[in-house]
Image (spheres, rainbow, N blue to C red):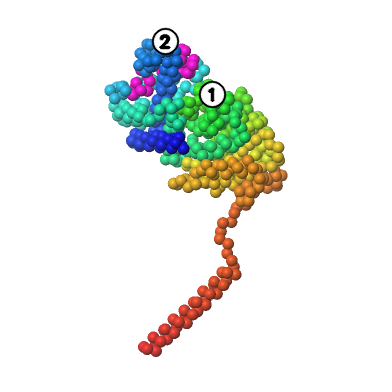
Amino acid sequence: MITDNKKEQERDELHRAIWNMANDLRGSVDGWDFKQYVLGMLFYRYISENFTNYVNHEEIEAGGADFDYIKLTDEEAETARESLIQSKGYFILPSELFCNVREKAPDNENLNETLEKVFRNIEASAQGGDSEKNFKGLFDDIDVNSNKLGATVPKRNEKLVKLLNGVGEMKLGSYQDNTIDAFGDAYEFLMGMYASNAGKSGGEYYTPQEVSELLTKITIDGKKEVNKVYDPACGSGSLLLKFAKILGKDNVRQGFFGQEINITTYNLCRMNMWLHDIEYTDFDIAHGDTLAEPLHWDDEPFEAIVSNPPYSIKWEGNANPVLISDERFAPAGVLAPKSKADLAFIMHSLSWLATNGTAAIVCFPGVMYRGGAEQKIRKYLIDNNYVECIIQLPDNLFFGTSIATCIMVLKRNKTENNTLFIDASKEFVKVTNNNKLSEENIQNILNVYRERKDKEYYAAVVPNEKIGENSYNLSVSSYVEQEDTREKIDINKLNKEIKEIVAREEKLRAEIDKIIAEIEVEG
């Protein structure tokens, strides 16, 4: 209990510090844009401290009790550049460490140029090495010369000093000492904070932590480890990182894989991996259009796939004659509509799912019942017994949309020719304007998922043949009856009460008539 209290205390303190700093700094800069600067500087501090701690630990182990990399000259540090790049994947000169740049920042008239050079040098240190793809362009979105920071160089530098100090004063401690993953927690808090303020533009790239937890626990149900995890539309990587938190990163044996089309979010995702202490050898995040140009073709199938792909986005579909013969989409004999790529992501995920794997994907409700090509794809999924479960979630869970979404769970090795439908629309707690899944809500859903039995007003196990007879409609409401919570009325009791009311009214009317008659006589 002491640890739990300490954890919450540390987290609350950290969140307050971030909130105050963000409010103090953003000013004229839009919150969602300014997030790039806060997170970028947080990342810069993290890799500086991570690098310093690694070098100091190695030297102290070798007998240099008083060694401190921060105090070395750049010339002294250069001698170890190659060996450090081999072991850490990158290199930072002592003069370019976060703490040393911050210390001199108030008197540095060229602070913007200094930071630009530092970021360029860190990225360049990884060029030609195994870590290059995980470092290239990481700092591109931290434009230290942007007018968003100020109209003049002195104004920009003034903001940059505040930014360095704000991030520098955060009580993050060392990764090993904290009861919380402070760097990662700071990142997640910022993402959530800005997503909630930015509406759809923020929520598009961020899945609430509780939804991430549910998706993760579904895909690892009954397992203590998986070969690797994959998200075809990974955003900032929060879904992937839930596996590190729940399973432990060492129990994701071959690492974390994802692809993201938005360059800014792609950079955030790679930063997020570093911030959560995932080594560069253990993640492979690609940039590009997953549906048109998937970049993990050569990897063996994934044992765990989770995703919250963008809802109903446009894609090439049948305008591209090559896609219908693409091995991901060809089995269904039809492509998802050009105006709604939702089921293309489902087919893509199924194609890359291991025989013993599970995929859990957040879906827009329309894909569950619309006709045309989408109905044909659902027919393929049901007739081949790939749909394990459909879970109806509550509304108002996600930033930027109040729509009640669903989760489609896919498996390749089902033994029973049926599909489980769960109505979890009432499983939520109210938090300000949003709904949220509590630990109890998540556990309730998981229990019903594991039991795989009919439960009145909650779950139904439906033979796939029956789903076919129902036009392959996968809406939970078609199979799980809603409980009628309206008050039940006793007609006999109601009639008796009406008679009594009528009798009272007649008595009152007679008394009123009598009073009026008396008044008239007196008059």
Label 1 sits on a secondary structure element that is: helix
Q: Judge whether residue 92 is colored magenta.
A: yes
Which residue: 37% across, 35% down? Answer: 17
Which residue: 36% across, 88% down? Answer: 523
**Can residue 212 be seen in this snapshot?**
yes
Q: Judge whether residue 455 is colored magenta.
A: no
Percent position of residue 88, x then y: 47, 18
Q: Which residues are magenta?
A: 78-102
Residue sitting nearer the eye, 230 or 243 = 243
Residue under label 2, please give it.
Answer: 79
- Residue 182 in which image quadrant: top left
Percent position of residue 414, x then y: 68, 36
Percent position of residue 75, x then y: 37, 11
Position of residue 466 in the picture relative to residue 106 (left or right) = right
Residue under label 1, please give it.
Answer: 282
Label 2 sits on a secondary structure element that is: loop
Q: Earlier in the sequence, mark 2 or mark 1?
A: 2
Q: Which mark is residue 157?
A: none
